[in-house]
Image (cartoon, rainbow, N blue to C red):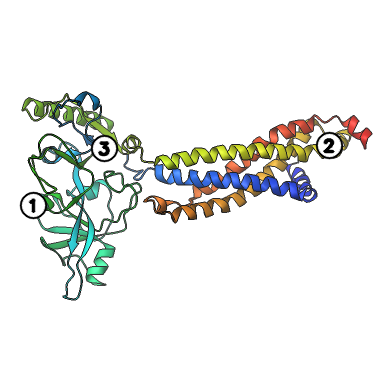
Amino acid sequence: MFGYYLQLALRGFGRNKVLTTLMVLTIAVGIGATMTTLGLYFVLSGDPIPHKSGQLYYAQLEPRTLGKDATLDKDPPRQMSRYDAEELLRQKRADRQAVMSAGAVTVQPAGSAAQPFRAMARYTSADFFAMFDVPLHSGNAWNAADDEARAQVAVIDRKLAATLFGNDTAVGREMRLPQGVFRVVGVMDDWRPAPRFYDLSSQRYGGDEQVLLPFSTSRALKLDTQGSVHCWGNSSGVDGGNYGLNAPCAWLQYWVELDSPQKARDYLKYLADYSDSQRASGRFERPTNVRLYSVMDWLDFNRIVPNDVRLQMWLAFGFLLVCLLNTVSLLLAKFLRRSGEIGIRRSLGASRADIFRQCLTEAGVIGFVGGALGLGFAAFGLWLIRQQPDEYAKLAHMDTTTLWLTFALAVTVSLLAGLLPAWRAMKVPPALQLKSQ
């Protein structure tokens, strides 16, 4: 019977071309606008490391002095001080742990004609690569011994390797900075998790970190750091942006890897015990306030999806509702104009259920065609977003899930819109229609 209803729907399109076109366009525009914003929302709110997001945790401590408004601070600083980060790193109570900060270095290419240039950098510890599954094209990461020795080693990305060494092998070569010569031990493959969950203090989306250096080496050489900084108390230990070991500033990100929920609970207790011990020694003044967030919890806490994207998504759904109501009106007009045809079918033996299914089939076909057109509108909308200067704009794209969801939403909307018109159509009294005919 579905094939028969489909034939009737296609014939109905030919008899009411203008009305059908209006309905298809109405659904297409509503679906296009909705899927544009929904597709962007899916990209921005997705799990950046799905196979390990439940094993990676972001640690927080409360090292600040009491101050006059301490009661207003319900959450600890979003980053960690250098003293605490290095002490936790030294104690190694997690399966893996990594301290890190964003930075920038001046690279001096070989040859007198080449001009120095700035490159984005990340200062971190050896476990960073294994924790976050950083892919290496060649070579290896440095090890814990290099961290302790403050070795001048580096991992660079493929783009920088090509710039400095061309087609030659970069591993084992030297990269020159104003602060000294670094030996390249590894070349990083393309790696741009979205969002940049491991460091939300600077650029949350995109980014192009070309140089990774040991954190201990970066502090020994006083390399430039980037990102947000929160200081309290006096400014001792702060030297022109170079934060000493005891500087009262939170500016580092600290991640741990724990492979079971029990280990996560134990580590949270360890953080509380550490906080208590620091308070007993006089370093900490505020009550114990420690946090341990998994990747997705940390993203939710930081409201990683921009507010304007959320607003646009809800506005798009509101617009889709308006399109739905307009489609209901158009379908109602379309079906009631065929009251005579419906009355004849009823007199020839068609049941009310048959009329209802026929009308819903026609609405579903309209939704499918509208979804196909709406898919084009959504692709165009995402292209427009990619032209915007926002840091997340380049991530806007349509994946397979969004594609199928577009058709599913279009058909669902058209079926919902067709319920009332189909119900009204099946209530048409056949006797009155036959008499009028």
Q: Which mark is residue 339?
A: 2
Q: Are marks 2 and 1 in contact (CB under 8 Å)?
A: no
Judging by the rendered image, the residue that carries numbered circle 3 is: 57
Closer-to-camera residue (316/130) = 316
Residue at (24, 31) in percent of width and height: 291
- Give coordinates of residue 368: x percent, y percent: 64, 47
Q: CA distance from mark 2 to mark 3?
A: 64 Å
Three-letter code for the amino acid on which mark 2 is drawn? Ser
Choose mark 1 or mark 3, whichever is in front.
1
Q: Which quadrant does the C terminus fall into? A: top right
Which of the pair 370/57 is nearer the observer? 370
Q: Which is more N-terminal, label 3 or label 1?
A: 3
Measuring from the top left, give residue 61's x and y in whole percent.
19, 32
- Identify residue type, mark 3: Tyr
Find residue 309 and report its image quarter: top left
- Reading the image, the residue beneath label 1 is 220
Q: CA distance from mark 1 to mark 3?
A: 27 Å
The answer to whether residue 407 of the structure is visible from this angle is: no
Query: Is residue 166 positioned above or below 122 on the image?
Result: below
Disc 3: CA contacts within 10 A as few (<14), some (14-19) or many (>=20):
many
